[in-house]
């Protein structure tokens, strides 16, 4: 029985959905739109119309008798490197077949319509995923277990009926009609779900603390932390864009579990598409009676508000986030009291991030043991990672906890771009650390990663190759956290500034013999004395870099050398005459005309003019341009 049939306050009746002969799903997440998804969508509508095929966005009995094509805009599919992604499902002769085309442009649409949709033969050279024929991209999904991302790329996030048809809000109905709040705590505890925002605290225990905390007026709050600010991270954004109702459902279940009647979704304003879809979804959920007063006639009321953050990284910290909701400057405060005791407006408050909440409905419907069966030791379930950097198949990957870093990078990610040597993987963003190749067999597990000096964090996984400088990478992350420091406490405000100054000197070739010892001393002081987790974890990229790549720091300081060629002040470019063909590609790429030579004759670089931008190195196809 569907949720719509169980609601005592029924939703407005609508014509029943029909199954069309052709379904086209186009990625309209942020990445898909940036790659031209809207233009591809328009091209399909126009192309189908020109071919005499009746195309509708939502086929129903009043618009389509079954002999039509449907076009749906979806959220992110995860395989971001291949956007725009287009799924084409055909149903002919009792057989259903789905293929996925990658890097689709409007110019490709006519051929797909003519040969595949009309002719019945897929355009094989453009296929990236197919159940009928193996492709290299099939590996991207083979090792994944998509629980959090189960609807992303599959449903239209702006249509609540799509979510309902996938069993949406059944978990909330089950909780409100069959379970007590304490039973909900125990179910989430038994699942082993831990906070996916970075700390990894048991979610069920967190809910239990908030439920047991007394409130002076009975008011409690439930907050979703969507302030995803790590460089290279886009897990929460993709869920909010692709499956907003799942987050609402998780929040409503959590609100019931702790006794909260009001909730806030805190999303940074830099996520305009996520905010737009959240507003659309919230209006639909309120209209259907899933959010608001007397939900599904059960007597439980839960209201939601969307709070747009100004983009301060520190507002990802719980107490700073609550300050921001209250209209104050987002700055952390001392704990205790913890939010569960005294949070938003001094009332008991629970805060979970987007990914954590997206797990909750799945756990309620499928059972705690089904979730706990996935994972490794104390780290249960799955984790979504934003796999970026120098990897062949970048994108979102949801893997069972316990998979190794090597498996994620080489099996799901396909290995290093251009088959260059692996250098490191940056785990956990600005609060995490750089891990070397020797640690690639470390499991994706809270405890194992913590031992290395890195963290699971919110799920950023940035892969570096031999062309990346570890010192420069540490400087990049420290520069980010130093700029994002709220300035409230001296260790973070001043300590990170002094550390950044030292790293900048080292990268400019002005390092001093005592710099490494001074960096370590400052880092430990900042970690131990900072007020909040931003300052407490800001030195991690530097400390792990020193721990595993100390020789690169020593080369910068004592040999004035950057082996990766990323630090311009420490890099010299030259041309090997024997390898140079005189093609002049390097000369054309040079922005300052520092390269001279006759056509088909060896060229030379004038070191006095060269600005060390590396354009010639990147352009040369014959390995004639070298750096040292």
Image (tube, rainbow, N blue to C red):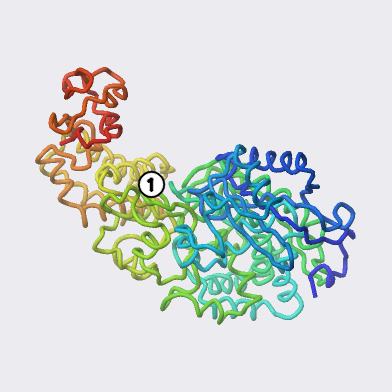
Q: Is residue 488 left or right of residue 563?
A: right
Quarter containing the C terminus:
top left
The answer to whether one can see residue 531 in this image is no
Counting from the top left corner in percent of width and height, residue 616 is at 27, 29
Residue 407 visible, this orientation: yes
Answer left or right for 461 relative to 219. left
| Residue drawn at 51 percent across, 56 percent down | 318
Q: Is residue 32 above or below residue 132?
A: above
Residue 364 vs 57, above or below: the answer is below
Residue 39 left/right relative to 545: right
Residue 476 percent coordinates (x, y)? 33, 42
Q: Would you name the residue on which mark 1 appears?
A: 489
Q: Residue at x 16, y 23 (%)?
A: 604
Q: Quadrant of residue 347?
A: bottom right
Q: Image quarter for residue 588? A: top left
Q: Residues within 10 Å of mark 1 (few under 14, many from 20)?
A: some
Rendered view: 134 above or below 71: below
Nearest the eye: 412 or 438: 412
> Where the N terminus falls, by quadrant?
bottom right
Q: Nearer the viewer, residue 203 or 154?
A: 154
Going 76% across and 52% down the picture, which residue do you hit?
Answer: 69
Question: Which residue is depicted at the point 74% across and 68% down?
Answer: 94
Identify the secondary structure beneath mark 1: loop
Image location of residue 139, percent across then percent down? 45, 62
In this picture, is 115 found above or below 570? below
């Amino acid at each position: 029985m569907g949720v719509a049939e169980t609601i005592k306050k029924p939703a407005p009746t609508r014509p029943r959905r029909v199954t069309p002969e052709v379904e086209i799903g186009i990625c309209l997440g942020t990445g898909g739109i940036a790659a031209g998804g809207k233009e591809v969508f328009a091209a399909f509508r126009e192309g189908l119309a020109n071919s005499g095929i009746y195309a509708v966005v939502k086929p129903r009995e009043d618009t389509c008798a079954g002999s039509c094509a449907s076009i749906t805009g979806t959220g992110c599919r995860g395989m971001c490197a291949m956007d725009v992604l287009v799924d084409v499902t055909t149903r002919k002769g009792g057989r259903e077949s789905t293929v996925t085309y990658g890097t689709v442009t409007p110019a490709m649409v006519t051929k797909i319509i003519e040969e595949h949709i009309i002719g019945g033969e897929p355009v094989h050279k453009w296929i990236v995923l197919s159940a009928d024929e193996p492709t290299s991209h099939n590996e991207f999904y083979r090792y994944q277990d998509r629980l959090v991302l189960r609807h992303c790329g599959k449903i239209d996030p702006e249509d609540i009926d799509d979510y309902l048809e996938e069993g949406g809000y059944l978990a909330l109905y089950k909780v409100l009609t069959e379970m007590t709040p304490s039973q909900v705590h125990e179910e989430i505890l038994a699942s082993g779900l831990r906070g996916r925002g970075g700390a990894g605290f048991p979610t069920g225990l967190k809910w239990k603390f908030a439920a047991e905390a007394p409130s002076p007026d009975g008011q409690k709050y439930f907050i979703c932390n969507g302030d995803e600010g790590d460089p290279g991270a886009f897990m929460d954004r993709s869920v909010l864009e692709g499956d907003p109702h799942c987050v609402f459902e998780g929040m409503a279940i959590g609100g019931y579990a702790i006794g909260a009647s009001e909730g806030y979704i805190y999303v940074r304003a830099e996520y305009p598409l996520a905010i737009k879809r959240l507003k659309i979804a919230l209006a639909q959920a309120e209209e259907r009676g899933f959010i608001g007063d007397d939900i599904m006639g059960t007597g439980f009321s839960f209201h939601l508000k969307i709070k747009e953050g100004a983009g301060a990284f520190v507002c990802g910290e719980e107490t700073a986030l609550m300050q921001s909701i209250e209209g104050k400057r987002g700055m952390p405060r001392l704990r205790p009291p913890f939010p569960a005791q005294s949070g938003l407006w001094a009332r008991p408050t629970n805060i979970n991030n987007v990914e954590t909440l997206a797990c909750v409905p799945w756990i309620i419907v499928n059972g705690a043991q089904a979730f706990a069966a996935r994972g490794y030791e104390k780290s249960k379930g799955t984790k979504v990672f934003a796999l970026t950097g120098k990897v062949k198949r970048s994108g979102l990957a949801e893997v069972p906890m316990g998979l190794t870093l090597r498996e994620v990078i080489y099996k799901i990610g396909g290995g290093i771009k251009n088959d260059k040597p692996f250098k490191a993987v940056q785990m956990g963003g600005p609060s995490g650390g750089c891990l070397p190749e020797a640690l690639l067999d470390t499991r994706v597990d809270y405890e194992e990663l913590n031992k290395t000096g890195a963290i699971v964090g919110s799920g950023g996984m940035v892969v570096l190759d031999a062309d990346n400088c570890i010192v420069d990478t540490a400087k990049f992350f420290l520069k980010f956290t130093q700029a994002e420091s709220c300035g409230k406490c001296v260790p973070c405000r001043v300590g990170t500034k002094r550390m950044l100054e030292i790293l900048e000197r080292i990268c400019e070739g002005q390092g001093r013999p005592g710099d490494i010892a001074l960096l370590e001393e400052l880092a430990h002081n900042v970690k131990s004395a900072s007020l909040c987790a931003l300052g407490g974890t800001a030195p991690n990229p530097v400390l792990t870099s020193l721990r595993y790549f100390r020789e690169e720091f020593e080369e910068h300081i004592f040999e004035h050398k950057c082996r990766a060629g990323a630090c311009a002040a420490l890099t010299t470019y030259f041309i090997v005459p024997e390898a140079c063909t005189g093609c002049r590609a390097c000369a054309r790429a040079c922005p300052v005309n520092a390269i001279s030579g006759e056509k088909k004759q060896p060229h030379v670089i004038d070191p006095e003019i060269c600005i060390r931008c590396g354009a010639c190195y990147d352009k040369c196809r014959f390995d004639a341009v070298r750096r040292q």
